Image (cartoon, rainbow, N blue to C red):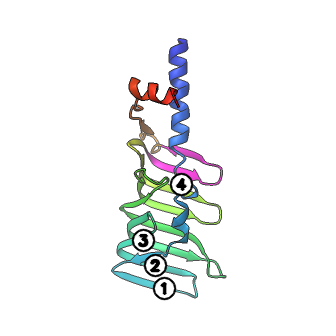
């Protein structure tokens, strides 16, 4: 491997690690302060079970966060705080802006589970994450929002993990000269 190839591989690996850290931990700060809006065709609340189930055409929004699914289960602790959210669809969709002025990170899977206490996100069944055109596709994607660790697995026996990177935008020589003078 030549030095140039090694540098390119190192650069791509670094970019991959940075791009795949999209999570609510880095969401717009104002999102968590916004009201949560939920709409669906049906809702069943089992308050004794600490469970509320929304079904058919479920849409949840909070600031830039948006979840769309066929069914969403919201689990509560005995203290009535949300402990886990499970979204199921063909597929279920999640999107949220990480930085102002950027496109939202988009994810989809047949099942999306968010463990609130441990801040873990699990995408299962044709899982897909897209950030600014850079994509990760696998049968299962696990993401620990606290440690920023992500793992992906293909379907047993035949599935693959696939990543697609779009080229970096190169600074024009005029922009580079303008920036050197600052």
Highlighted range, magenta: 136-153
| Alpha carbon separation for disc pair 1 and 4 | 28 Å
Marks 1/2: CA distance? 6 Å
**Residue at image mark 1:** 45
| Label 4 residue SS | loop
When the figure is inspected, residue 69 is found, relative to residue 163, above or below; the finding is below
Q: Which residue is mark 2?
A: 53
Task: Identify the residue position indicated by label 4 in the image.
Answer: 23
Looking at this view, is 3 or 100 the one in front? 100
Q: Which residue is mark 3?
A: 60
Q: Where is residue 150 drawn, in percent x and y?
A: 56, 46
Report helix, strand or loop for mark 1. Answer: strand
- Nearer-N-terminus badge (2/3): 2
- Mark-to-mark CA distance, 2 and 3: 13 Å
The residue depicted at 41 percent of the width and 56 percent of the height is 109
Which residue in the rendered view is the most extreme toward the top?
2
Few, some or many C-alpha atoms within 10 Å of disc 4 (few <14, some 14-19, many ≥20)? many
**Residue 119 versus residue 86: which sits nearer the camera?**
119
Q: Residue at x 56, y 26 (%)?
A: 10
> Answer yes or no: do the residues labelled 1 and 2 have beta carbons within 8 Å?
yes
Overall secondary structure of the magenta section: strand
Q: Which mark is residue 9?
A: none
* Camera-nearest label, 3 or 1: 3
Disc 3 vs disc 4: Cβ atoms closer than 8 Å? Answer: no
Helix, strand or loop at mark 3: strand
Mark 2 or 4, closer to the camera: 4
Q: CA distance from mark 2 to mark 4?
A: 24 Å
């Amino acid at each position: 491997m030549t030095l140039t190839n090694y540098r390119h591989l190192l650069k791509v690996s670094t970019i991959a690690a940075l791009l795949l850290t999209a999570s609510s931990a880095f969401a717009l700060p104002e999102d968590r302060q916004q009201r949560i809006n939920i709409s669906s065709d049906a809702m069943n609340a089992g308050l004794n079970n600490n469970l509320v189930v929304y079904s058919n055409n479920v849409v949840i929004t909070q600031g830039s966060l948006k979840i769309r699914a066929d069914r969403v289960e919201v689990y509560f602790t005995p203290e009535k705080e949300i402990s886990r959210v499970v979204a199921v669809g063909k597929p279920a969709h999640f999107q949220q802006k990480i930085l102002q002025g950027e496109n939202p990170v988009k994810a989809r899977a047949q099942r999306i589970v968010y463990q609130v206490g441990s801040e873990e996100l699990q995408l299962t069944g044709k899982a897909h994450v897209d950030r600014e055109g850079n994509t990760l596709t696998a049968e299962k994607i696990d993401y620990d929002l606290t440690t920023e660790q992500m793992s992906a697995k293909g379907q047993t026996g035949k599935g693959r993990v696939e990543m697609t990177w779009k080229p970096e935008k190169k600074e024009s020589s005029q922009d580079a000269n303008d920036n050197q003078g600052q």
